[in-house]
Amino acid sequence: MQFCSTRDAGRFAGARQAITQGLSEDGGLFVPAQIPAADLEVLLAKREYPALAAEVLGAFLTDYDPAFLRRAAAEVYGPRFGARPAPLARAADGMYALELWHGPTCAFKDYALQLMPRLLVEAKRSLGREETTFILVATSGDTGKAALEGYRDVPGARIAVFYPSHGTSEIQRLQMTTQPGENVAVYAVQGNFDDAQSGVKLVFGSRMVQDELAQRGVQLSSANSINWGRLVPQIVYYFAAYQQLLEQGAVTLGDKVDFCVPTGNFGDILAGWYAKRMGLPVGMLVCASNQNNVLTDFFATGVYDARRAFFRTTSPSMDILVSSNLERLLYHAAGDAAKVRGWMESLASNGRYEVEPAVMERIRAEFAAGCADNAQAAAELRTQFERAGYLCDPHTAVAFKAAREYRARSGGAAPMVVLSTASPFKFPGDVLAALGQPAPQGEFEAMEALARHTGQPAPAALAGLRTLPERFRQTIRPEEIADVALGRK
Ligand SMILES: *Cc1c(COP(=O)(O)O)cnc(C)c1O
């Protein structure tokens, strides 16, 4: 299987190259040149998550040894992901929650970021490449920790993570600043996520930086969801959700299922679209945004306009104005790389672009959208808990709210699966407040209070942060990210 650039359909790469390289040289994202069709019955018969994962990965990563993929999936998706990876829980009002936060850092990003370093190391080994890979990550909270945990002490790799100085939850921040490992570094960057992300993108775009590093045998790479290696593992759990609906008798093979996804960079929801294109019976994909509702407006109007106020919300991993992976969907929907290049140039220079009605019509046949502000998400979080005893985090609450509205609007009768993307114990103060409980000042006191109030234990990986020393305390300006890349900071 070949991958091409969203901005130049004549520029091809194999999977190993796409994964080692991250972005195409022309600034575009790698997309599969054709989307492989799954034999649904064969695939869904793979009941063990690692076997299912190896099959889905193998369909896209055709230049990897299938035995390697089976081994990697078996090593990664073992006990660290709980008794059964990606369990489906019942939530209020007939909705389901696909719980993706039972991995080592308590957010869904573990599914991709535990696997991706192995994909990278194997690609380099088999391509005979000996450079050091330097991973630079801009994070709105969860990517940073999941990437640190995935790349820690991986041979031939180093990682530096940049998080907005005022943008993550306190628990998210501590997860990063206490990170062990010899090859890791963490920096606070003045500003919001988009400032950090733009700073990192500038470094990736700088010939000067790349050349200087190349002389030292270092190649930059990214762990953000612009990398295909980050996206492909996320396709797997859509199939796992469907398997569980079959097991529970909620669907029979072929029935459509709707999914609602709390969205930031548009990676997780796009993985669902790829699952659909492979043949999974997916009805609507509902894109849920918080108050930073660029995407809701885009689906309504066809205008993507990032020139707007930025809000810090209780769902920080969705506080994003430029959703990079939308570019992939635009490529598939428009089928025209030159158009995509034009839109992205317009975004870079004018902060906006407009997609014509014919393309939007195709997109709207498969995607719906909705948004919720902090108060609406908090009310939904409380409703879930009071009606069904279902405890979710603020990101997932945004999605439940969008899913509920979509169902009311469309009269949708298909089962609705909401992707539950983070443990509520990552945001204990906000979750307690949403439940109408007094929230103690300290985050760890709040964690304990939340455990007491709900009768659910805080994950050990979060409660244990309390006693870990903070290793990284440096705050830098976005322009200084280049200095970090060059080892001057
Ligand atoms: C990253 C993240 C999201 C957004 O996922 P995208 O793939 O960026 O759209 C949603 N919720 C949580 C908890 C996250 O960490």
Image (cartoon, helix red, strand yellow):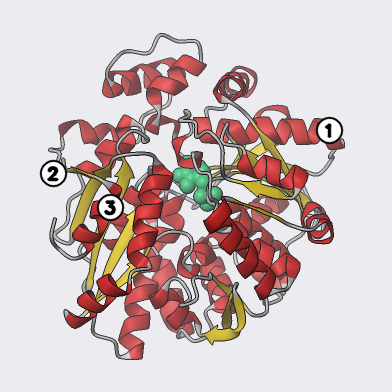
Dot 1 and dot 2 residues touching (CB under 8 Å): no
Determine the secondary structure under disc 1. Answer: helix
- Residue drawn at (44%, 17%), measured in percent from left and top? 432
Place of residue 210 in the rendered image (x, y in percent of width and height, measured from the top left): 28, 74
Report which residue position mark 3 lands on: 479
**In the image, 349: left or right of 485?**
right
Q: Amino acid at mark 2?
A: Arg
Determine the secondary structure under disc 3. Answer: helix
Pointer 2 residue Cβ closer than 8 Å to ligand 1:
no
Q: Amino acid at mark 3?
A: Glu
Lower sequence index among marks 3 and 1: 1
Q: Nearer the viewer, residue 95 or 436?
A: 436
Q: Amino acid at mark 1?
A: Arg
Dot 3 and dot 1 residues touching (CB under 8 Å): no
Residue 409, numbered circle: 1
Q: Nearer the viewer, residue 181 or 241?
A: 181
Mark 3 or 1, closer to the camera: 3
- CA gap, disc 1 to disc 2? 49 Å
